[in-house]
Image: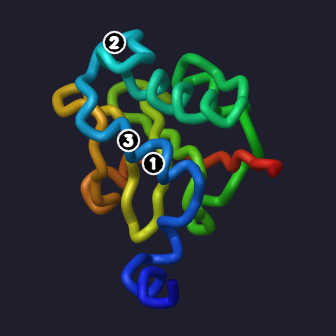
């Protein structure tokens, strides 16, 4: 067991990571929330719904969801809110190690290094899970 943990970043152990990872490769579909395709907010909605969390369905609605987190204090599982073309038009989930998992319009659900999109990051929100 110690060997397994030494091979993984502790950041990747957040429960959202395991649920969100199963959607990697799902194609992008505007308004989608299922395996046939999902947009960014549909992806986050789907992940959170697997934990019984009633989540917003649009990117803009995430700005008031959960607890505000300073961008320099983000942790795995935090919801990241971006402004690419208009205010708060994209969301994803931070998975640690400077990576975000999200549904990109041209690539579908992917894991992406934050260095490519951090300049568009406007806000982070934290969702508390109770076990």
Estimate the x, y position of residue 29 in percent, counting from the top left.
29, 15
Give the mark count.
3
**Comparing labels 1 and 3, the label whose residue is closer to the camera:** 3
Residue at 59% x, 64% y: name it.
75
**For marks 1 and 3 on the same chain, the one whose residue lies earlier in the sequence:** 3
In the displayed image of the protein, which residue is found farthest to the left? 106
Separation of marks 1 and 2 at Cα, in angstroms:
21 Å
Residue at 48% x, 65% y: name it.
12
Q: Identify the residue under disc 2.
A: 30
CB contact under 8 Å: marks 1 and 3: no
Residue at 47% x, 22% y: name it.
42
> Is 16 in front, or is 57?
16
| Horizontal side, residue 111 vs residue 92: left or right | left
Estimate the x, y position of residue 110 in percent, counting from the top left.
27, 43
57 to 97, vertically: above or below: above
| Horizontal side, residue 63 vs residue 67: left or right | left
100 to 65, vertically: above or below: below
Q: Identify the residue under disc 3.
A: 22
Q: Which mark is residue 121?
A: 1
Residue at 52% x, 45% y: name it.
80
Separation of marks 3 and 2 at Cα, in angstroms:
19 Å
CB contact under 8 Å: marks 3 and 2: no
Estimate the x, y position of residue 51 in percent, counting from the top left.
67, 36
Q: Secondary structure at mark 1?
A: strand
Q: Residue 50, located in which quarter of the rendered image?
A: top right
Estimate the x, y position of residue 16 in percent, counting from the top left.
55, 49
**For marks 3 and 2 on the same chain, the one whose residue lies earlier in the sequence:** 3
> Is 64 in front, or is 19?
19
Q: Secondary structure at mark 3?
A: loop
């Amino acid at each position: 067991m110690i060997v397994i943990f030494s091979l993984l970043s502790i950041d990747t152990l957040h429960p959202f990571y395991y649920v969100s990872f199963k959607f990697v490769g799902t194609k992008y579909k505007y308004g989608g929330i299922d395996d046939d395709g999902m947009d960014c907010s549909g992806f986050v909605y789907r992940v959170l719904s697997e934990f019984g969390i009633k989540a917003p369905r649009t990117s803009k609605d995430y700005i008031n969801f959960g607890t505000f987190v300073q961008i320099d204090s983000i942790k795995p599982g935090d919801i990241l809110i971006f402004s690419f073309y208009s205010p708060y038009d994209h969301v994803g989930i931070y998975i640690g190690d400077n990576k975000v998992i999200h549904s990109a319009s041209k690539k579908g659900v992917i894991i992406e290094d934050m260095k490519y999109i951090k300049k568009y990051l406007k806000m982070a929100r934290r969702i508390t899970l109770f076990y």
